Image: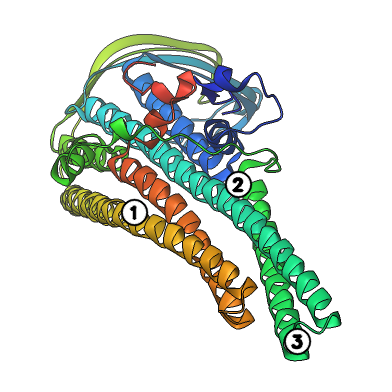
């Protein structure tokens, strides 16, 4: 698992080594995530289970040895000399066996575990998709918080400039003390907003560090490639159903359950093995001296009655197949829901951005007009301060909507299961290898 996730676009940011791009942050987070490390360990463990199941096709070789004391008595009345009744007994044996037929249980078990390994591998990719979205969300929110903080700091500076101006006018008798009190209150409010923005940024920086394992210094606003978005919602949903790793994982679980049913039905058939056995014993059964034998035989084992265990296990496997089928249905519904929600947010936020841009332009024009009118005595200070608050809120709303719109675009790709592909994240080779081609 410790093979690092590599981004194909890392070279684009080599000019600024201190900057942390979105793609690099996602790559670091995937390599840093304990959830993904745990899922990778699960995937590897099932691959080893496949190796163990394949071993049943190979010859089995067992060696047996024993040594001890033997005291022999016969009930037939035959007298055994005392020196032969008590002897040191030794046994050495070797047995080689080869499975010939077991009702295809081994074949079904290998197939079952192979599908389970593929399911775990696909869940690993799905987990990486979700980690990527978490990182994108906190990355964009951190950038947004930084921008809002800068806006808040500029708002404080502008209010302090007005305060200085009103203070000077008051000292000259051109403004009243009530104007000075009013601007003092607004300065305090702007500083309070700046403190809240600072606190929010600290929280987001902490979240980023928890996810990525690095501090969010010099983040770069991502340039989203909107050509990655399908032309309409229906295509996006269909692509998600066809390619989302969680749906594919559920389909692999269905196949694994089918193979488990095959394995359990194999108990209805006899098992055939060819066995070669050789023994070399000493002082066995009250007879001093060697006791040797060797044989090669075709053996058959047939479970006539097992108390209904085979029937119960077969039915249990069938119910697990039904469970896997419903898991796939749930995963498909989640893809449809997630894509639909993200698509609607993407479209509506785009419309909202346009309106908020108009709001920003109009609010700024109104502010400039109010300042000019205030200077000639046609507007009150309250009008100017209210206009300034309107500009601040309009800009803040636009900034928040702009980042939310970008996040909605990434959410669409996540719902489709194509987020890491869009980010050009290259997975380690071990992630791309299933049980059938490792």
User: 369 and 423: which one is in front?
Assistant: 369
Q: Quadrant of residue 84?
A: top right
> Is label 1 or label 3 in front?
3
Q: Secondary structure at mark 2?
A: helix
Q: Which is more N-terminal, label 2 or label 3?
A: 3
Alpha carbon of mark 1 to alpha carbon of mark 3: how far? 37 Å
Relative to 274, does residue 393 appear above or below in the rendering?
below
The residue lying at 28 percent from left, 41 percent from top is 416
User: 280 and 88: which one is in front?
Assistant: 280
Relative to 389, does residue 311 appear above or below in the rendering?
above
From the top left corner, tell me how far across and down residue 394 is, in percent: 48, 64
Q: Is residue 207 left or right of residue 126?
A: right
Q: Quadrant of residue 267?
A: top left
Alpha carbon of mark 3 to alpha carbon of mark 2: how far? 46 Å
Q: Which residue is mark 3?
A: 181
Relative to 186, does residue 364 appear above or below in the rendering?
above
Q: Which residue is mark 1?
A: 354
Q: Secondary structure at mark 1?
A: helix
From the top left corner, tell me how far across and down residue 254 is, in percent: 20, 42
């Amino acid at each position: 698992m410790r093979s690092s996730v590599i981004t194909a676009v890392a070279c684009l940011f080599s000019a600024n080594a201190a900057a942390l791009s979105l793609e690099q942050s996602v790559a670091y987070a995937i390599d840093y995530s304990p959830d993904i490390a745990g899922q990778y360990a699960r995937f590897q463990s099932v691959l080893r289970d496949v190796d163990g199941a394949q071993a049943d096709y190979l010859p089995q070789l067992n060696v047996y040895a024993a040594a001890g004391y033997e005291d022999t008595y016969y009930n037939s009345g035959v007298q055994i000399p005392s020196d032969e009744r008590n002897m040191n007994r030794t046994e050495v044996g070797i047995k080689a066996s080869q499975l010939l037929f077991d009702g295809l249980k081994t074949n079904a078990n290998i197939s079952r575990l192979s599908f389970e390994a593929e399911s775990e591998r696909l869940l690993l990719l799905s987990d990486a998709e979700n980690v990527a979205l978490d990182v994108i969300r906190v990355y964009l929110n951190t950038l947004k918080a930084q921008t809002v903080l800068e806006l808040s700091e500029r708002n404080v500076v502008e209010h302090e400039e007005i305060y200085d101006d009103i203070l000077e006018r008051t000292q000259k008798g051109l403004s009243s003390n009530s104007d000075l009190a009013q601007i003092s209150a607004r300065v305090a409010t702007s500083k309070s907003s700046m403190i809240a923005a600072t606190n929010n940024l600290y929280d987001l920086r902490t979240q980023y560090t928890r996810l990525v394992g690095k501090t969010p210094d010099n983040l770069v606003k991502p340039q989203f490639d909107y050509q990655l978005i399908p032309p309409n919602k229906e295509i996006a949903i269909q692509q998600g159903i066809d390619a989302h790793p969680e749906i594919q994982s559920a389909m692999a679980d269905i196949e694994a359950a089918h193979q488990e049913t095959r394995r359990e039905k194999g108990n209805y058939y006899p098992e055939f093995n060819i066995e070669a056995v050789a023994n070399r014993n000493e002082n066995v059964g009250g007879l001093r001296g060697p006791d040797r034998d060797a044989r090669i035989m075709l053996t058959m084992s047939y479970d006539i009655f097992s108390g209904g265990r085979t029937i119960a296990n077969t039915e249990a496997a069938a119910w697990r197949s039904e469970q896997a089928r419903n898991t796939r249905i749930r995963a498909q519904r989640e893809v449809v829901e997630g894509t639909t929600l993200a698509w609607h947010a993407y479209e509506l936020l785009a419309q909202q951005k346009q309106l908020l841009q108009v709001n920003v332009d109009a609010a700024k024009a109104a502010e400039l007009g109010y300042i000019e009118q205030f200077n000639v005595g046609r507007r009150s200070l309250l009008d100017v301060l209210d206009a300034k608050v309107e500009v601040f809120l309009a800009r803040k709303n636009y900034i928040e909507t702009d980042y939310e719109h970008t996040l909605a675009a990434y959410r669409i790709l996540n719902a489709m299961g194509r987020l890491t592909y869009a980010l050009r994240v290259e997975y380690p080779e071990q992630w791309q290898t299933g049980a059938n081609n490792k």
